[in-house]
Image (tube, helix red, strand yellow):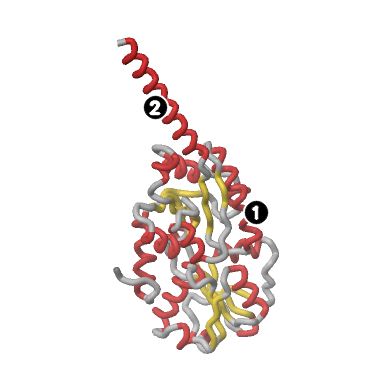
Amino acid sequence: MTSFTAWSRLRAACLTVLCLAGSAAAQAETFVFTAIPDQDERHLTERFGKIADYLSEKLGVDVKYLPVKSYPAAVSAFRNDQVQLAWFGGLTGVQARELVPNSEAIAQGKEDTEFVSYIIANTSTGLEKSEQLPAELAGKRFTFGDKGSTSGRLMPEFFLREHYGKSPDELFSRVGFSGDHNRTLSLVQSGAFEVGALNYAVWDAEVAQGNVDASKVKVIWASPSYPDYQWTIRGDVDARFGAGFKDQVQKALLAMTDPTLLAAFPRAGFVPATNQDYTPIRDTAVAIGLMDAE
């Protein structure tokens, strides 16, 4: 009996050590997130580094921001488990969640429930702000942002097709893709392209920072609203970082109130989100041929 009791105690002790070791390993694992590069990469790295520090403190694990070079790279990083959390646009979020089973949209900016795209024009065109898209837009040199951008490509293209009954290639004399919203602004302001589409939040931020020359570029049209950016998390984070970890991440994001941190997006704060919130984005992508129906 003594031998059996001693063996049982030894076995229990070993199991305890193994459990503690497994728990420590999970806690030691780094939680990684990324963000679509919708603005200048240097600014994003600086800003999202602060978000990593905030999340690390709130979650009690090491958190790292992984910069990516393109919208597809952000989706690929999520799909390949290089990152477990991502700040996606509406379209990239839909794409990523379809590639990674059980992934979820968990938070969106307060502004993202009713996001808006702007059409901007170089003042040399003579185009003025109006409620309707002007007939004079036809034949101009037009640039979108990134090909995978919701606010810089998907929704503007949808509204253009809906209004004019033509594809961008049919409507404009030249169509470009700048890569990000800041670049779109620069190209239109310089006159390299006469007209372009970008999201209103970037425009407003650039105006506030004095980077918009009103004598050279102006907003001529604002789109109807639609759901856009969101935080999407992989479905396996609880298994890797402990039960309830997904909920902890969501709570940390919703509790973010520091204006310095929120300026990284820029947003006034975050509210809960679900996958179903982005059904209209998927439907739009299917309608203009950017995604398959199934």
CA distance for labels 2 and 1: 43 Å
For the point 41% across and 51% down, the residue is 234
The answer to whether residue 274 is above or below residue 279 is above
The residue wearing badge 2 is 15
* Residue type highlighted by circle 2: Leu
Tell me if I can see residue 65 in this picture. yes
Quadrant that contains the C terminus: bottom left
Residue 137 at what x, y percent from top left? 52, 84
Residue at 65 percent across and 73 percent down: it is 186
Query: As drawn, is 191 to the left or to the right of 113?
Result: right
Q: The residue under label 1 is which amino acid type? A: Glu
The picture places residue 292, in percent across and down from the top left corner, at 33, 72
Mark in the foreground, 2 or 1: 2
Image location of residue 270, percent across then percent down: 49, 49
Give the quarter of the image for residue 242.
top left
Provide the residue designation for mark 1: 46
First of labels 2, 1 by sequence position: 2
